[in-house]
Image (cartoon, rainbow, N blue to C red):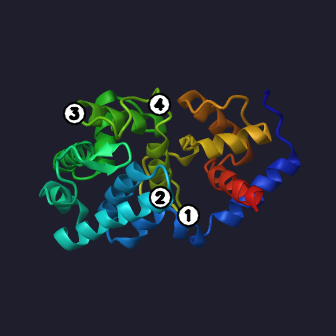
Amino acid sequence: MNETPLNTELNNHLKSLAFRYEQKEFLVGDPSRFMHRIEGDANKELLAFIASALSYGSRKQFLPKIQALLDSIVNDAGGDVGKWLTSNAYETAVPPTPTCFYRLYTCQTFNNFLKALAEMIKEHGTMKNYIVAYAYRKQTNIDTLTALDAITTWFREHNSTGVIPKDTTSSCKRICMFLRWMVRDNSPVDLGLWSDIIDKRTLIIPMDTHVVQEAMRLGLLASKSTSMSNARKLSRRLCEIFPDDPMKGDFALFGLGVDTDK
């Protein structure tokens, strides 16, 4: 299948869908809702990252799982996510055992993920601080790929596997979703807490099968691969439609799928 040229009708349709679906109501059934339920930028950042790590499979299964962790944060650490992590309070909700925690994650796997995240907070204070420090150490500008490389490197080097991809050869779908939440500003959905360090024009679309299906149907992609190279290719195409904010296209493709299913 070949990619098709963009046209005014398609552009306008996607812009209309993006406007229609990027509304506060979008939060109701989406994992992004949890970061709006807690106070403080540092808490929002951490809860968003934890929520993104669990956001795969059936929403009926993973939304209650995220809520259970939020309940533990409130009950065991007064809503302070950093304290919940660095005091090891998370081990009450996620003990280091071989039992299943969620789908492919055992409790041990997710415990290792939270332990690595706790180490990041102990050393850097916030994830944002870590990204800045990583870019400074590498003597590179901060963009989405830098942030992805920083995050995957940290978890790989801190003995956490199975939750965060080992490197950016993966499409890093859930981290890309987290970065959209952190970087895009002036949105009723996304927080924009990192808008001062990362340009939203560099964001990469979270590459799930639904996005690929809709993008192929529209001729925006020629391959159904969910690779990083295909994610970047689709993001560049969305940049042609939304040059200042390509991830509006994420809402548009979501909306197109909803409209198609009606």
Looking at the image, is mark 1 or mark 4 earlier in the sequence?
Answer: 4
- Residue 195 visible, this orientation: no
Q: What amino acid does circle 1 point to?
A: Asn
The residues bearing labels 1 and 2 have C-alpha atoms spaced at a distance of 7 Å
Mark number for residue 170?
4
Q: Position of residue 201 (x, y in %)?
A: 58, 44
The disc, 1 or 2, on the residue closer to the chain's N-terminal end is 1
Q: Are marks 2 and 3 in contact (CB under 8 Å)?
A: no
Q: Nearer the viewer, residue 59 or 200?
A: 59
Q: Amino acid at mark 2?
A: Gly
**Spatial CA span between label 3 and label 1:** 37 Å
Classify 213 as above or below 1.
below
Residue that numbered label 2 is attached to: 192
Question: Which element is circle 1 on?
Answer: loop
* SS at circle 2: loop
Q: Which residue is mark 3?
A: 159
Question: Reading the chain from its start, which is encountered first: label 2 or label 3?
Answer: 3
Q: Give how far across and how far down residue 102 sits, in percent.
A: 35, 51
Q: Please report contact status of discs 3 and 1: CB closer than 8 Å, yes or no.
A: no
Asked if marks 3 and 4 touch (Cβ < 8 Å), the reply is: no
Asked whether residue 122 appears in the rendered view, the answer is yes
In this rendering, which labeled residue sits more in front, label 3 or label 1? Answer: 3
Query: Do tag 2 and tag 4 residues touch (Cβ < 8 Å)?
Result: no
Find disc 1 in the rendering and name its residue: 186
Q: Amino acid at mark 4?
A: Ser
Question: 197 and 237: which one is in front?
Answer: 237
Asked if residue 169 lies left or right of residue 9, the reply is left
Element class at badge 4? loop
Query: At which x and y percent is residue 228?
Result: 54, 30
Q: Could you tell me which residue is drawn at 63 percent across and 64 percent down?
A: 22
